Amino acid sequence: MAIRPLTLNLALVTWRPEGIARVAAQQLPRVKGVSYVVSWQDHEGAPVPASLDERDDVSIYRCEAKGISANRNNAIDHCTGDIILMADDDITYDAEALTAVIVAFETNRHLNMATFKFDGAGSKPYPSAETDLTFPFPYGFWVSSVEIAVRNQSPAGRLRFCPELGLGGRFPIAEDELFVIAALRQGITPRFFPIVTGRHNGPTSGRQPSSNAALQALGIYVAMAYGIGAPLRVYTRARLIHRQGRASFVRAFAGIMTGIFKAPAFKRRNKKYLW
């Protein structure tokens, strides 16, 4: 009996009328088995661009909730393909890369979650070869949301991003890191593939100044990821942020520690998204 080819949904998030215009300008590639599920936040009642509305491989769902994590969850909730690849409106995708994502899952039938690469990630390091991801990750490596793909009908397909984290949420970062940690805590082993899935069209945010809320989010992540060993990580994290010019050492240290103290209450509020 022949095995049915897998299908791929890009769970693509955007916001505001100018965001949907960026999606239209991308000229998303037409690829057999690939379709685009767009979650559109803060749409202001604007019409869908005709170039998207006329396509049978693009579905657009307006999202009334706030924050990028809620937006991603809305896109995931509407995906019906075998594989879901997280996507943003400022990344350019090509047919060959999307086909490679499908092949990765087809040749690894027990794979529930995969991570990939994208051009434009700045100085972010990646593993040199295909490998399972275990915690702690290689030094300096982290997983960005748009590098994550999950098998829809699997434990990984039931994961969702924590709405308190990410742009527009209570804490503006760390939603992607905790998504991966939640997978690991639930017994899911992500596998990294050195496949470039897209090109980021703009500056990265990895070296921007850190707000107090962002520092607290980092503290929450450190507490959730390292448990009782979290306080030992604060000095090195604060020193790195200071070296990058994102905050003074004292402010970074204090902000991260505040986040660690807030982590227990954060976990109680968001247990359905964690473990």
Image (tube, grey):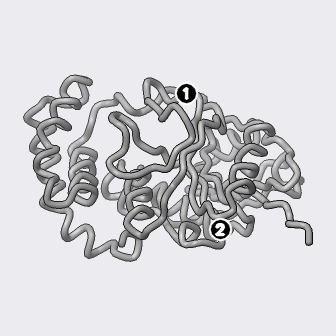
- The residue under the point 54% across, 66% down is 156
Name the residue nearer the viewer: 103 or 26. 103
- The residue under the point 28% across, 54% down is 221
Q: In the displayed structure, does residue 133 sit left or right of residue 25? A: left
Q: Residue furthest right?
A: 1
Q: Report which quarter residue 40 is drawn in.
A: bottom right
* Circle 1: residue type: Gly
Picture coordinates of residue 210, whole percent (x, y):
27, 37
**The N terminus appears in which quarter of the rendering?**
bottom right
Picture coordinates of residue 248, whole percent (x, y):
14, 29
- The residue under the point 86% across, 66% down is 4
**The C terminus appears in which quarter of the rendering?**
bottom left
Measured along the vertical axis of the image, is residue 254 above or below residue 239?
below
Q: Who comes first in sequence, dot 1 or dot 2?
A: 1
* Circle 2: residue type: Asn
Picture coordinates of residue 66, whole percent (x, y):
46, 61
Secondary structure, mark 2, is loop
Q: Is residue 253 visible?
A: yes
Judging by the rendered image, the residue that carries numbered circle 2 is: 152
Q: Mark 1 packing: few (<14 Cα in 10 Å), some, or many (20+)?
A: some
Label 1 close to label 2 by CB (< 8 Å)? no
Q: Nearer the viewer, mark 1 or mark 2?
A: 2
Secondary structure, mark 1, is loop
Judging by the rendered image, the residue that carries numbered circle 1 is: 120
Q: Mark 2 packing: few (<14 Cα in 10 Å), some, or many (20+)?
A: many
> How many marks on residues?
2
Picture coordinates of residue 244, whole percent (x, y):
26, 24
Q: Report which quarter residue 60 is drawn in.
A: bottom right
**Spatial distance from mark 1 to mark 2, Cα to Cα?**
27 Å
Q: Is residue 146 visible?
A: no
- The residue under the point 70% across, 43% down is 23
